[in-house]
Amino acid sequence: MALEYTNKNNVSLALAVFLMYDNYEYDERPDSISATGLIRPLRQLVLSKQNPALLKTVDIADLVSTRMGSAIHKGCEDAWTDLDNVSNALRVLGASEDAISRIKINPETIPAGVTPVYVEQRVEKEIDNFIISGKYDLVLDGTLNDYKSTSVWSYIYDSNADSYIKQGSIYKWLSPDKITNSYMNINYIFTDWSAVKAKADAKSYPQQRVLTKQYPLWSIEETQNWIQNKLAQYKLHSNTPQEGLLECTDEELWATEETFKYYKNPNKLDRSTKNFKTMNEALVRKSADGDVGIIKTIPGEVKACRYCPVVSVCTQAETMLTEGRFTL
């Protein structure tokens, strides 16, 4: 799929050439859905199908995160497909020569005693007249590993846990012979990590720029049931007008919780007296102050819409934009 680019922010030539470099393996088959596509909200899937032109135009500046992620993935792929590099690294890390000799990269068969390593393998499977495809990052001796370059915020709040588990489970469903363990490793590379913040908050802030966290995977049966249900909903609503589509949930929107701001003096609204997580807590404080103040409900901030390719035609996004729940 050839993309059309805009350069609204006058990105320099040096950066523009890099940002416009696209080696993604697009699948033009109309019945094909990628693992990453399948886990997207149903509303986004349907609106993308109904508005294909929106997926073909992108501003160069909006590609920074994508290209940074791609560059990291390419570097990891190169490192793991260079057997000499892998051997040297394992040697430095203390592996025995026997263990190193057992490593085989992307083997077609697995003789006894071999430790298989699969790197950037594309797989697909047909189900219910659809083709589900995916390309996983790395499988080490049966364990799926995925690299994620992301913000510290997403790690602290684990905001993408559900997506990671779904994506990993689909990969296992696609390659049960290679991905044999019931968990996956997400290898975080933080894009906004701060040594100062790490020192100030040793309890919740990650103490290093790279971390690995383990997530459970669904069973093959659970994953297949989820896939079939999602495909059935997609098929049912593929031509449904927006007003008939379910709205994205707060979880899908990466929405923060709403806040209840209490102002003891109704005439001074520039700064709240105290913020509360629940209306009941705010009402208790208001009552304690003799019911003289007011409470304002502040809707949770929505983050996912900023990255949605169909935000410009989505009526739900339009409403939330008007409410001030996010900015473009």
Image (cartoon, rainbow, N blue to C red):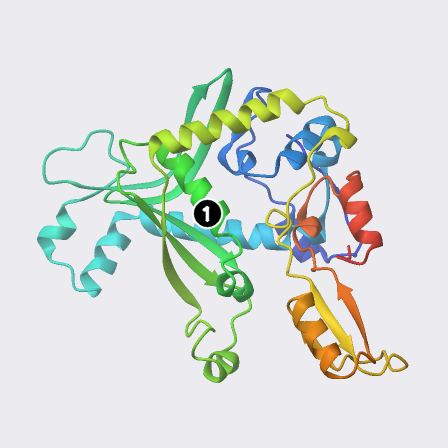
Taking depth in this image into account, of 57 and 157 the one nearest to the observer is: 157
Q: Which residue is mark 1?
A: 164
Taking depth in this image into account, of 226 and 37 the one nearest to the observer is: 226
Q: Is residue 82 left or right of residue 259?
A: left
Figure quadrant of the N terminus: top right
Q: Is residue 107 above or below residue 283?
A: above
Q: Local crowd at mark 1 within 10 Å, few (<14), some, or many (≥20)? A: many
Q: Is residue 128 left or right of residue 94?
A: right
**Residue 222: x percent and y percent?**
39, 33
Q: Residue at x 80, y 52 (%)?
A: 321
**Residue 271: x percent and y percent?**
80, 80
Residue 312: in sight, yes or no?
A: no
Label 1: element kind = helix
- Res 124 → quadrant: top left
Q: Is residue 73 left or right of residue 303?
A: left
Figure quadrant of the C terminus: bottom right
Residue 49: in sight, yes or no?
A: yes
Q: Is residue 231 above or below residue 281?
A: above
Q: Residue at x 39, y 47 (%)?
A: 77
Across the whole image, how many numbered discs are drawn on residues? 1
Taking depth in this image into account, of 238 and 62 the one nearest to the observer is: 238
Q: Residue at x 49, y 35 (%)?
A: 35
Which three-letter amino acid code belongs to the residue tagged 1?
A: Tyr
Q: Is residue 140 above or below residue 178?
A: below
Q: Residue at x 48, y 80 (%)?
A: 201
Taking depth in this image into account, of 109 and 78 the one nearest to the observer is: 109
Residue, far top: 129
Q: Is residue 239 left or right of residue 166?
A: right
**Residue 178: x percent and y percent?**
28, 35
**Residue 47: x percent and y percent?**
71, 32
- Res 263 → quadrant: bottom right
